[in-house]
Image: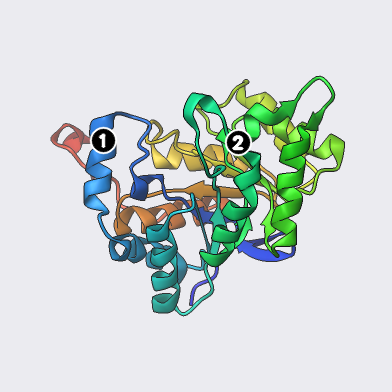
Amino acid sequence: MATFPQTTVGGVSLSRLICGTNWFLGYSHTSSAKDRFIRELFDSPSKMAKIIEVFAKRGINSVMGPLKAELSQAIQEASQRAGIKIHYICTPDFAGDLSGGKQDIANWPKTVEKSKAAGATFCFPHQCVTDCRLDRLNRCLAPDLAQALRTVREYGMVPGLSTHAPESIVCADASGAECETYVQPYNALGFLCQVETDWIQKVIHQAKKPVMTIKPLAAGRLLPPTGFAFVWSTIRGCDLVTIGTISAYEAEEAVELSLACLEGRAAKVELQTTRSKKALQK
């Protein structure tokens, strides 16, 4: 079994590369047509498991995604196939009626219990829960969000915050919240980053806990060599990168490109070719 550079988050040893799931679940950040294509392509847990298994066999031991039965099944199947423990980094929202933007904190323990039953090692309130509960003025979290993190700990999982707002990291650290890590968009394009990338980098470098970066390729807007080179060269040794892929081939390429960045060598990947590049070939 291959290995990948590791870090420790909340006492759990994780590979610094995380398998993302937007490209399994239909979150393309492109169009509803693209979302539909993805959902139809991955219409069973087994199809998701095949790609997770590719990551697992290269030493990637964690998968990040929402609380979904099909994802839990896929992780369990891939774990059995690969013969390693794959940690489920679960990012649920609050259960209950969300009409009018309302979320019932009273349902959070039920959500945490379901996450535990689904096999999650980590449980992070999703961005839609976190970012509306920041007290930027007093640099702290809203009381119900702080309690949500404590509830995760009570159920024996590792708590963290999934966020798009870099202030979440600042507020959690300043208030001493029960938080072991943070999920934060970070890419060379600044896609879904709420401030400039140099400011995001500063927040990451000053964070008291490891940061799980997401969207390294800006949801397909950046070429893989470009996107990976930026994130791997500008985060700390304790931080992580999350990448989703739509095929086993892309999964293999993502691992190789990441290792090449971390090892300071040229990546052993085949370049895509078109007729217009014929004159460039030797």
Residue at x 42%, y 50% (from the top left corner): 21
Q: Which of 220 and 36 lies nearest the eye of the viewer?
A: 36
Q: Quadrant of residue 93?
A: top right
Q: How many marks?
A: 2
Q: Position of residue 266 (x, y in %)?
A: 46, 51
* Outermost residue to the left: 275
What secondary structure is marked by label 1? helix
Q: Quadrant of the C terminus?
A: top left
Q: Is residue 46 above or below residue 81?
A: above
Q: Measure the alpha-carbon separation of dots 2 and 1.
A: 26 Å
Residue identified by numbered label 1? 34
> Which mark is drawn over residue 129?
2
Amino acid at the residue labelled 2: Val
Amino acid at the residue labelled 1: Lys
Within 10 angstroms of label 1, few (less than 14), some, or many (20 or more) residues? some
Q: Quadrant of residue 156?
A: bottom right
Q: Quadrant of residue 16?
A: bottom right
Q: Position of residue 31 (x, y in %)?
A: 29, 28
Q: Is residue 59 above or below residue 25?
A: below
Residue at x 42%, y 52% (from the top left corner): 254
